[in-house]
Amino acid sequence: APAAIPLSAAAAWVAASPRGATRASGPRPRAELGAVAAVALAFAIVVVVGIAENAPFSWDESAYASTTRHWLQGGPATAWGPSRPPVLSVLGALPIAFGTEEWQFRLIGLAFGLLLVTATWLLGRTVAGPVGGATAGVLSALLVAAAPSINVDAGLFLTDVPSAALIVLLLALVWRSFEAASPPGWQILGLAPLAALAFYVRYGSIVPLSLILLAVPLVWPARVVAARRQLGGTLALFGLLLLPHAVFATLQRGSPLGIVLAAQGGAAGAYPGAGLVQYLAWLPAELVGLVPGMVAVLGLVVGARQLAFVARRRAWDARGRAYALLVGPAVAHAVLLGLVALPQQRYVFLPMVLLVVAGCLALAHAASERGSAGRAAAAGMVALAWNGISMPVRAEARTAFTEWERQAGALIRRLGGGSCSVLASDYPQITWYSACPTYNFADVHRPGRERLLGGEHRFLVLRADGKFQPSGAVLDAYLGLVDPEPVAVLAHRDGHEMARIYRFATE
C-alpha cells in the first residue's frame, strides 16, 4: 500500500495530541468543513491522476458503456445481461452525449468517490456524537480517501464505489433519524428512494440493506414501535420502488429474487468459505491499505468487545448502538460474500468502510479533540499526495496488459466498416472498441459459435496466453475456418505476443 508509511505517522500524530481531556466541544465547524474539503480535494486530484493515465476499459466497464451506447445510438450490446443493474448505464448518457473517451465515463466514478468520502465523514461524525465527532468524521474520511484500492476503483466506470457511497449515506441518515431526541417522523420516507437507488446501482446492495433493516429494531426497539406507521410506510414505498424489478425478474427468471441471486457473482471457491479465508488473509494491508486496514481491525475488535459488554448488561447505550450499526452489518456482509462469491477487493469496500469508521470512533474516544480535524486534514494531504505519485504506476501496470484489447477493437472497427462481427473471449471490451457484435466461446467442447456471426467482415481473436480460450481440438477447428495469415499480431510493449486477429474465410 503506497500510503502506508506517511499515513501511519499521520494517524499517530492525530491521535497523540496531549490536550484531549481539556476540551470537549471540538473544533469550530468552519475548520472541520475546511478539513473535509481539503481531504476531498486531495482525493479528487489523486483519482484524476489515475484517470489521466487512460487505461483501457475493463470487462465490466465495457459492458456498462456498451449498453449506454446501445440505448442512445444503437449498435451492439452483446456483453449485457439482466443481472447487470441499469443505473450506471443510465448515468452513462451524460458523458456519451459529448464523446466516447474512457475518461468521460470515469468522471462518474470520481463523483461517487467524492460522495463516499463525504458520506464517510458524515457517518463518522454522526455516530461519534458531539464529543469526538469531528475527529472521528475527518479521520474516517481521511482513511477512506487514502485507501489505494478505493483510489483506483473511484477512477473506473463501475458500481462498487457508487453503491458503497449511497449505503454509507443511508446509514448516516438512519442514525440521525432514530437517534434524535424524538421518534422519527414521516421524513424517513426519504430513506426509501435512497435505498432503492442503491439497489438499482448494484443488485447486491440488497444484502447490506437487509442487514441494516434487521439491525434497526434490535438497536432501537422502542423507537421502532413508536414510529411503526412511518417505518411501515417507508418499507411500503421501498417495496413499491422495487416492484418494476420484481416483475422483470419474475419474467426473466421465474422469481423476484432470480436476478439478484444470479448477480451475486460466481462460485464460492475451492471449498465453502474459501472467499472468507482469503479476505482474512488479505487483512490488514491488501484490502484498503495498511493503516486503513489496521484501523478497520481495531474497529472490529473494539466493536466486538463493546457489543459483548452490551450483551452482559442487557441494555443499549449510544456507543453500543453505534458499534452495532457499523460492525454488525459489516461482518455479516463480509461473511456472506466470503461464502457465496469469489473474493475481490472491490466486493468488500462497504464492509471495510464501516469497520474503518468503527475504528475511527474508537480512536476519537481515546484521543484529544482540539485541533484534531486540522491535523487529520494535513495528514491527508501527505498520504494522498503519496498515492498520487504512485497512481500512474498502478495505471501503467493495468494498461500494459490490456492495451491490446483496445488496439484489437480499433483495428476491427476500421477493417469492418460497420458490417462486422467477432468471436473472442474478451467480448465486452472488443464490443466496445470495435462497435461490432462480439460473441464468446460459450461451449469450449466443440466449435460452432462462428455460426452466430453476421455481417460482411467476421473476425476471430485469439489470446496468446490461452486464457479463456477453447481447447486445442476446438481451436484447431476454428483455425481451419479462417484465412491462414492473421490480420494482425498484437504485442506487449516489451515485444512478446498478446493476441492474433484472424478473418473468417468468405464463401
Image: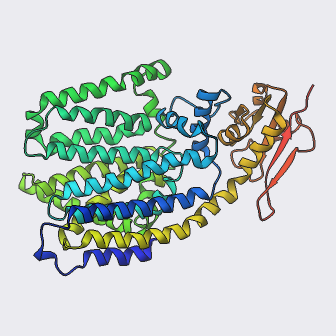
Tell me which colouring the rendered structure shows: rainbow
Q: How many marks?
A: 0
In the image, taking residue 375 as reference, residue 5 lies left or right, namely: right
Q: Outermost residue toward the bottom?
A: 18
Q: Position of residue 81 (x, y in %)?
A: 56, 30
Which image quadrant is residue 70 in?
Answer: top right
Q: Is residue 80 left or right of residue 184?
A: right
Residue depicted at 23% across the width and 73% down the height = 371
Q: Is residue 483 or residue 181 the one in the foreground?
A: 181
Residue 196 image point, x, y percent: 35, 33
Nearer to us in this view, 332 or 65: 65
Q: Nearer the viewer, residue 314 or 134?
A: 134
- Residue 266 in the image: state x and y as whole percent: 52, 41
| Residue positioned 47% across, 52% down in the render | 346
Height in image: 361 above or below 101?
A: below
Q: Above or below — where is 15 with respect to 403?
A: below
Looking at the image, which residue is at 15% across and 55% down?
320
Identify whether 165 is placed above or below 26. above
Q: Nearer the viewer, residue 313 or 418?
A: 418
Q: Quadrant of the C terminus?
A: top right
The answer, for residue 327, to whether it is visible in the render is no
Residue 126 in view: yes
Q: Residue at x 86, y 34 (%)?
A: 504
The image position of residue 403, as x and y in percent, is 71, 53
Residue, far front:
30
